[in-house]
Image: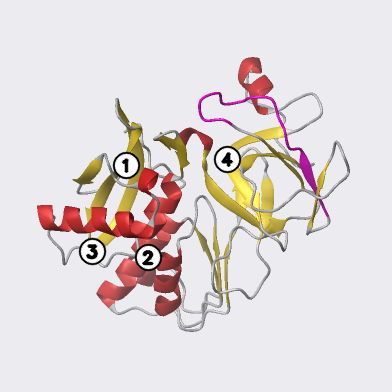
Amino acid sequence: MIVRTFFPPQITTLGSVPTRLYYYIADMMRTGTRLPSVKKINVAGTVLTPAFAETIRAAFEGLCSMRNHYSMSESCGVLCSPPYGELTPRGVGFPAPMVELKVTAFSIAQQGSTATWRICALGARSFLDLDTGEKLGPMQYGELYFRIPSVMKGYYRNPELNAKFMDAEGWCRSGDIMYYDEDGRVYFVDRLKDMIKCLDQQVSSCELESLLQQHDSVADVSVVGVPDTKYGDAPAAFVVVKRTCTPSAELAAEIKRLIAEETETFKHLYGGVVFLDRLPRNSNGRSSSTS
């Protein structure tokens, strides 16, 4: 009854975080409610996986545009946005107007290490090395920094945190690992603090979660690194199964096999599979690994 109660039948645009959108769609399926007037859906707060994007397209038959925006509360504005009219998620789009971006080299062992790459966005698609003036190569991971006129003044009475977030030139630290492709489209990889180091290799928890969400039995999932003397951080999957499924050792083995068949050795679920009734999430829909 959530959708029927709170969304008028003439609504054309819907904005939400993926987790809330999941509950809206579940309510629509349960009650038979449809919103054919919805033409545009804007998603932010976390990454929209391909599997869930397909679920959204199936639920909203009249959809013309589905965009996964990238922003932060501190930016007070959108940092990256896909073009209107796209229905298949391809990263978080291109830098928004008046937004400058740069990417610095990062190390899991030494977070905040000296920057190697410094890039900015000029217009929508031009990424340059600010030291040499040469175009920065695509597909190179780094921590994203941004400058935007609308950025917050600072954290209230917390100068230490302000200094960590923004430097003297106005560059703000996102704490997110990003890259861009040959077209200048920007992609979110993972939060820096959530990157896993297994067998001395960098593992994105978001990549593994996206794969696992394609499994027919998985309703929700979070992948974290579990300290391990052999692997360093052993990737472990915390899984919520769909109501029509039952957790079992066979299902856990099937989930581990999916990752083993689709990824490199250092990304395998050495930490195992744990079934939960629900995942703890914050107000933006992001899973809380510390919980």
Q: Nearer the viewer, mark 3 or mark 1?
A: 3
* Residues tagged 3 and 4 counted as in contact (Cβ below 8 A): no
Separation of residues labelled 1 and 4 (CA atoms): 21 Å
Q: Which residue is mark 3?
A: 217
**In terms of secondary structure, where does tag 3 sit?**
loop
- Rendered location of residue 17, percent (x, y): 47, 55
Label 3 or label 4, whichever comes before in sequence order: 4
**Label 3 sits on what residue type?**
Ser
Q: Residue at x 56, y 78 (%)?
A: 39
Q: Indicate which label's residue lies in the foreground, 1 or 4.
A: 4
Q: In terms of secondary structure, what is the magenta stretch mainly?
A: loop
Q: Are marks 3 and 2 in contact (CB under 8 Å)?
A: no
Point out the frontmost of discs 3 and 2: 3
| Dot 1: element | loop
Vertical side of 47 occupied by 190: above or below: above
Mark 2 residue crowding within 10 angstroms, few (<14) / some (14–19) / many (20+)? some
Residue 176 shows which numbered tag? 4
The residue positioned 25% from the left and 50% from the top of the image is: 239
Magenta segment boundaries in residue numbering? 107-122
Q: Position of residue 232 (x, y in %)?
A: 36, 29
User: What label does residue 24 carry, if any?
Assistant: 2
Q: Gap between marks 3 and 2, in whole Å?
A: 19 Å
Q: Nearer the viewer, residue 76 or 70?
A: 70
Corner quadrant of residue 101: top right
First in sequence, mark 1 or 4: give its number. 4
Label 4 environment density (alpha carbons within 10 Å; few <14, some 14–19, many ≥20): some
Tell me how far mark 3 sits from mark 4, CA to CA. Answer: 29 Å
Residue at image mark 1? 280
Tell me: 285 left or right of 23.
Answer: right
On-image quarter of the N terminus: bottom left
Q: Is residue 145 visible?
A: yes
Is residue 1 visible in the rendered image? The answer is: no
